[in-house]
Image: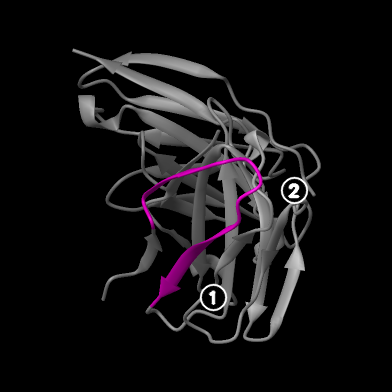
């Protein structure tokens, strides 16, 4: 049981390049989400999904696309990288609907630098 | 969404009990209170969650007064490895309700 797996761990992009950050979970959770964390700040929600085929925007969705074709995978695509997207990206999956046992499980993060 | 306010930073020494208080004056009836811990270069990790009164697990205790407008995370006998950022979140179980503020940076000194 690996939990939430993110790849790659590190990435350097040139301005204007596109790439996809991968996220996979093996806990059969319906809810998954992407956050970005800038230095010294908390996490900000980019996009989230409440199940396969369903996605929605969070606080900071501009410049990012997501898709959810399977329960396990929730990739995040940067359309045209900009220096402002330099950040650490975290993927999470949540056992939503468990009331007081609702818990988000986070991946180890992807550190992205756009030059 | 209920806004939370917590201290930006706290210092403590090994072996002491640490209490981090979070204010959430606009908490809604359906909202839970959840705390996460984040070490450098890692994703946040769930610590504890509660709705009212006191909750205790093997890691921490969470105290919630009757009006639920604040909560206190209590870490007993901290060690150097408890140095981390602690986030207080308030919201119902919907994923888009999980809003992380800046958190409280706890530094445990020898």
State which quarter of the image contains the N terminus of chain A.
bottom left
For the point 34% across and 34% down, the residue is B75
Chain designation of label 2: A
The residue under label 2 is A60
Circle 2 sits in a helix, a strand or a loop, which is it? loop
**Residue A96: percent from the left, percent from the top?**
57, 74
Residue B109 left/right relative to B71: left
The residue under label 1 is A98
- Please report the bounds of the magenta region as a residue range: A8-25
In the image, residue B89 sits, relative to residue B106, either above or below, namely below
Q: Is residue B21 visible?
A: yes
Depth order, front residue of A65/B51:
A65
In the image, residue B16 sits, relative to residue A71, either above or below, namely above
**Residue B46: percent from the left, percent from the top?**
42, 53
Q: How many marks?
A: 2
**Residue B68: percent from the left, percent from the top?**
68, 44
For the point 56% across and 19% down, the residue is B8
Q: Are marks 1 and 2 on the same chain?
A: yes
How many other residues sit within 10 Å of disc 2, few (<14), some (14-19) or many (≥20)?
Answer: few
Q: In the picture, residue B102 is in which quadrant?
A: top right
């Amino acid at each position: 049981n690996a939990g939430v797996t993110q790849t790659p761990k590190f990435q350097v992009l040139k301005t204007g390049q596109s790439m996809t950050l991968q996220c996979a979970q093996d806990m059969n959770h319906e809810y998954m989400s992407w956050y970005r964390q800038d230095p010294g700040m908390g996490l900000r929600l980019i996009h989230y999904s409440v199940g396969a085929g369903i996605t929605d925007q969070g606080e900071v969705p501009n410049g990012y696309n997501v898709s959810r074709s399977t329960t396990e995978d929730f990739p995040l695509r940067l359309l045209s990288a900009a220096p402002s997207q330099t950040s650490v990206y975290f993927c999470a999956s949540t056992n939503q609907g468990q009331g007081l046992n609702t818990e988000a499980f986070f991946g180890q993060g992807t550190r992205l630098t756009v030059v | 969404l209920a806004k939370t306010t917590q201290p930006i930073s706290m210092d403590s020494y090994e072996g002491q009990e640490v209490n981090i208080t979070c204010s959430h004056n606009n908490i809604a009836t359906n909202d839970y209170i959840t705390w996460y811990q984040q070490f450098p270069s890692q994703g946040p990790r769930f610590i504890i969650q509660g709705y009212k009164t006191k909750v205790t697990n093997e890691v921490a205790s969470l105290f919630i007064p009757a009006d639920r407008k604040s909560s206190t995370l209590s870490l007993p006998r901290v060690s150097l490895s408890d140095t981390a950022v602690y986030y207080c979140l308030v919201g119902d179980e919907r994923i888009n309700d999980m809003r992380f503020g800046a958190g409280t940076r706890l530094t445990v000194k020898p």
